Amino acid sequence: MFFDLGIVTPPPDVSIIGFAILCLVSFFASGVSSSLGLGGGVMTITALIYLMNPTAVIPVHAVIQANSNFFRALMNWRSINFVWILPFICGSFIGVIIGGQLSFNLPKHLIEGIIGLFIIYSLWGPKLMNFNKPSYLVAMGTGIFSSFATMFVGGTGPLVAPFIKATTADRIATVATHGAYMSIQHTLKILVFGILGFAFGPYMILIISMVICGVLGTWFGKYLLILMPEQSFNIGFNSILTILALKLLYSAISQLISPDA
């Protein structure tokens, strides 16, 4: 059944303490994303992995991130760059369809390693792919690759971030446009998980609570963004990207060395 809601009760696999921790994480993660443009998604999925049923992490994370990114984009909607959004949507649709079909077959650490290498290269490597001269093909390719990967690892905002950063003029436009792109991508992912039969119902109270905390965090982070100097934003943006990429590479290498760890 599409979007089996089940009985709307607190999730049986999350304790009261875990519930409170996840709500706090949602607040701070949304604040981080709203002020620096990214980082909150990976922070949220890390907490979810530790505190709830692993099989529900990616679908629940998709709902939370779709709302968090939507409100982040909504609060700065005048600054969104819509030029490349249509090819990105087309690419994302293709990516989630393919990823949904293969999500149980491709090793997670392989996707993590690819994403980590891509981010490091896009920031510090020679610019074979010139993001400063974007095209519809690059936008679609970014949508395909990032949406395919998000079906396995969830928080792929850093994968989209280099393209967004290169196609926006200032930090507010970067944050708003990144939020718009990611809210669309996560919404497509929710639809695919619904079609595949995931039951969101048992997690609705947790989702709603985390969304509310996320909206409050996004509002808080918006004011930090306005007050933050452009140079500080760029340093923070690139630093978070690099740290998250290294974390992904570490996870991938650890799984290759010790698959049963």
Image (cartoon, rainbow, N blue to C red):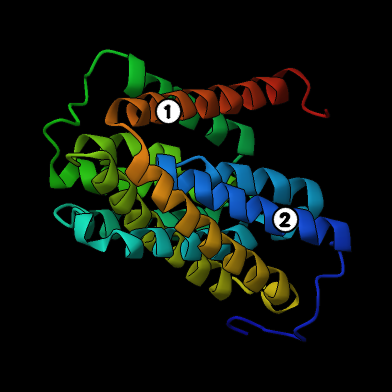
Secondary structure of the residue carrying tag 1 is helix
Q: Residue 236 carries which label?
A: 1
Residue at screen point 49% across, 54% down: 220
Residue 72 in view = yes
Instruction: List x then y, in percent, for residue 132.
Output: 15, 30
Name which of mark 1 and mark 2 comes first in the sequence.
Answer: 2
Q: Nearer the viewer, residue 177 or 134?
A: 177
Q: Is residue 156 left or right of residue 173?
A: right
Secondary structure of the residue carrying tag 2 is helix
Give the amino acid type for the residue marked by disc 1 in the picture. Gly
Instruction: List x then y, in percent, for residue 77.
Output: 26, 62
Residue 155 in view = no
Q: Nearer the viewer, residue 195 or 12?
A: 12
Relative height, residue 73 to residue 224 (above, below): below
Q: Which mark is residue 22?
A: 2
Q: Which of 22 and 8 is in front in this view?
A: 22
Residue at screen point 24% across, 49% down: 140
Q: Measure the C-alpha gap from mark 1 to mark 2.
A: 24 Å
Relative height, residue 84 to residue 39 (above, below): below
Quadrant into which the C terminus falls: top right
> Alpha-carbon neighbours of circle 1 within 10 Å: few (<14), some, or many (≥20)?
some
Quadrant into which the N terminus falls: bottom right
